[in-house]
């Protein structure tokens, strides 16, 4: 049905929906990737902001290689926004499997996913478990 200006809004909506339908998985993955980057940044920033030696803090959890990979990635974050840092993490993780593995291990060792779920206000332990599984399932990480 066209409006007074000749615009078929229903047809346009249908065309947009048809165009977006095969791309829906891209949007879902983009969301999961942004979540992953934000979680890794959230795990690292408290350490960085204390002024502690990041390498020294990470070595017991990740070993020399994992800690070194993360420290190298973190260099240059000083003047970036949270969103830019999350994008850096995502780009680094996509291009370096060993770095991605180290970041996955960091998330596991610091219980980042359970902390997010607990802080999300989910009360039921049953629902909490399902949501942890959902979050993990959305991220294409080595530990999934």
Image (tube, rainbow, N blue to C red):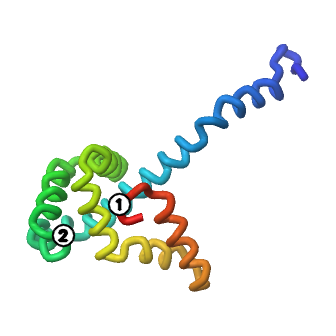
Can residue 81 be seen from the camera position used here? no
Residue 67 lies, with reference to residue 115, above or below; the image says above
Q: CA distance from mark 2 to mark 1?
A: 15 Å
Where does the image place residue 82, in percent across and percent down from the top left? 34, 53
Coordinates of residue 122 in the picture (x, y in percent): 58, 78
- Report the front residue among 142 and 44: 142
What is the x, y in percent for residue 104?
31, 64
| Callout in the foreground (2, 1) | 1
Residue 62's label in the rendered image is 2
| Residue projecting furthest to the top | 6
User: Disc 2 vs disc 1: Cβ atoms closer than 8 Å?
Assistant: no
Instruction: Label 1, secondary structure: give it.
Output: loop
Left or right: 7, with 128 as reference point: right
Closer-to-camera residue (17/137): 137
Q: Residue at x 47, y 46 (%)?
A: 30
Quarter of the image where one finds residue 24: top right
Q: How many marks?
A: 2
76 to the left or right of 6: left
Q: Quadrant of the C terminus?
A: bottom left
Vertical position of residue 61 compared to residue 24: above or below = below
> Where is residue 64 drawn, in percent x and y?
9, 66
In front here: 52 or 137? 137
User: Tag on residue 142?
Assistant: 1
Does 116 sit left or right of 24 as displayed?
left
């Amino acid at each position: 049905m066209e409006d007074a200006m000749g615009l078929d809004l229903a047809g346009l909506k249908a065309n947009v929906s048809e165009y977006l339908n095969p791309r829906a998985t891209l949007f879902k993955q983009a969301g999961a990737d942004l979540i992953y980057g934000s979680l890794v940044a959230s795990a690292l920033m408290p350490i960085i902001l204390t002024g502690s030696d990041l390498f020294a803090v990470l070595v017991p959890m990740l070993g020399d290689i994992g800690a070194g990979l993360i420290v190298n990635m973190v260099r240059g974050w000083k003047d970036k926004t949270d969103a830019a840092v999350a994008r850096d993490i995502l780009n680094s993780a996509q291009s370096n499997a060993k770095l991605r593995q180290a970041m996955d291990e960091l998330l596991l060792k610091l219980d980042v996913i359970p902390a997010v779920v607990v802080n999300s206000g989910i009360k039921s332990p049953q629902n909490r478990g399902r949501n942890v599984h959902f979050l993990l399932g959305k991220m294409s990480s080595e530990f999934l």
